[in-house]
Amino acid sequence: MWSRLKGKFPPVMERFKGPKTIGLAVGYFMILNYVVGNAFLGIPFTFYHAGMFGSIAILLLTMFMEWNSARWLFEVMSRAQALETFKQEQLAETQSEKSDHLPALSDRSHVTTDDHPKYEISATRKFELAELCQVFVGRWFKVFYLLVVITVSFIGLWTSSTVAGSAWSTNLPLNFGSLQMCTEEEFQDNIYPKGSGCLAAYRFCVFLFAVMVLPLSLLELKNVSFIQTIFGGLRFVIIGAMVLYALSNLAINGIQGGVPLAANVTASNLTENVVRDFVFGFSFTGLLSAISLFTSALVIHPGLSTLTHPIKNKKPLGWFVLAVYGTVAVFYILMGVILTLWFGSDANSTITLNWVASTKPDHSAVIRIISYFIILVPSIISTYPIVVYFTSNNIYLVLMGKDTSQKTSTRDWIVLVLIKAIFGVLPLIVALFVSNLIYINKYSGLVAFLMSALFPGVLQLTSQRKCAKVFGGKREGVADSEQTPSTGLEMDTIKSEEGAPLMEGEKADSEKKEASPREKETVYMTPYSLPVLSHPIVTVVQLAVAGVLFVAASASIAYRK
């Protein structure tokens, strides 16, 4: 009886695994939904205050740096996989010496090809960034990364909660019981909205948002891939609706036709002002401040491992992410140019609020429906579950000493769900009492910018160095007995099935012959590497540029405060 029931109801871990892989199309929309988030709503406001051409240049520069950092991480993941596989060979050699039944280490066809390590991203083994930090740098770097990613993710989740609460409470007719529909003025310059009725409506909306996002946050990402695909498609629809709405009105009413004319202002004056201040305008401090928002609207690396792990075909991942960024860049530039020409200096820092006036009864039903769609949907298609998922995975990795892609038990699954629940609930609780995050968000974007440059860059340099040490000693003409390289690496978080560390410390080998500098340079090149952009000098230059921009942007924000 029990055996039949056990066959019908598999273990809990098996029941929650979901589909093994997803295609590139589904992965495209999942990544698109994560990248876009809600930060894109501030792009027209930023474009106006920084100038059109300068904003486009900074946007493209930020996009290039984010893509190159993401590509570096693909290289780092493949190097970590090669090192782990190499250590498994070492374990096999040790066992073969004892049993004489296993192949010797000299037969390394499944790890190396033509004297070159086989770099690949495994379909089953996932390397979160926290683990990569320990593998290639050390435990302190792993802890540092975890603290930074928890802080940035918490602020992002907190912001998503307050955006949903404020958007819904100011646009939905919640006038029943102790609830009262809010106005924008009740949120301005206040830690939480004024008026008990508005505060009750705001908290009720945050509760509704929690009911919507928390169940999705507890599931495996592969189990909600269909929903994330829909959300990613809706991003296109929302941006397209805003751009087409403004473009059609520009054709009818001209530049800044979305703004009511004052008594002493003519349409020609408005056009001249917008052309002067926006099209040909330039603000150095505005451009530096734009770095924070553009990074928030483009950052991908914290969730990169989690988002790409379910994708079946991992060979084109570098160009695949570039395609996502290319799509995003086109939409962002269209938003920044067309919506700024339409709203001009009145472009709100959250552009959807410019459609509030179009929801009034004096507009047609079609316009009101479109306006409500533009205002409310961005807060509904939240990236909340994705952020909870990858942040919880990194916390689990540090606490349990292994990744979720490795062997897990029901106990491990319970621990992971508890981490997700706690990390998912805390920002919602804080959002109930603090709804104004304007000042914090200015700097959280800068922290995200520094994080997206620092960690991938450091991991790129250290992983190249490690692989040059491990695999760089293999040369033609050197006897097999002299070609066994040491790992030069501590990989405490990567363990064998018996629990022994997979990587030992570097051992001196007086007989090993050194490879030439040129051979060491090429031995760490992976299928995700590019001849110039993967060179260590380029990595150092990008890190230096990011550091200078971070300091300058921080000073600019502090100055404009």
Image: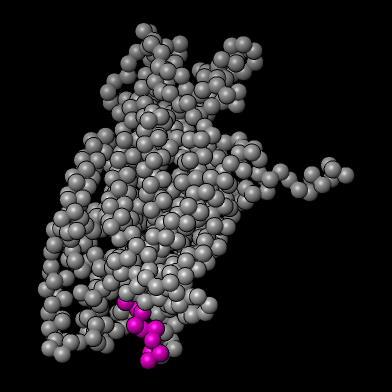
In this view of the protein, which residue sits in the foreground, 25 or 561? 561
- Taking the image as drawn, is residue 295 in sight? no
In the image, the segment drawn in magenta is 353-363
Residue 213, compared with residue 403, is above or below; it is below
Q: Is residue 414 rendered to the left or right of residue 529?
A: right
Q: Position of residue 227 (x, y in %)?
A: 54, 62
Which residue is found at the position 29% from the left and 84% from the top? Answer: 249
The residue most toward the right is 1
Which residue is found at the position 12% from the left and 88% from the top? Answer: 264
The residue most toward the top is 510
In this view of the protein, which residue sits in the foreground, 23 or 8? 8
Q: Position of residue 72 (x, y in %)?
A: 35, 41
Q: Position of residue 26 (x, y in %)?
A: 51, 58
Residue 469, compared with residue 204, is above or below; it is above
Which residue is found at the position 36% from the left and 26% from the top? Answer: 466
In magenta segment, residue 59: no
Rendered-image quadrant of the N terminus: top right
Quarter occupied by residue 195: bottom left
In magenta segment, residue 356: yes
Q: Position of residue 291 (x, y in %)?
A: 24, 55
Q: Is residue 16 rendered to the left or right of residue 229?
A: right
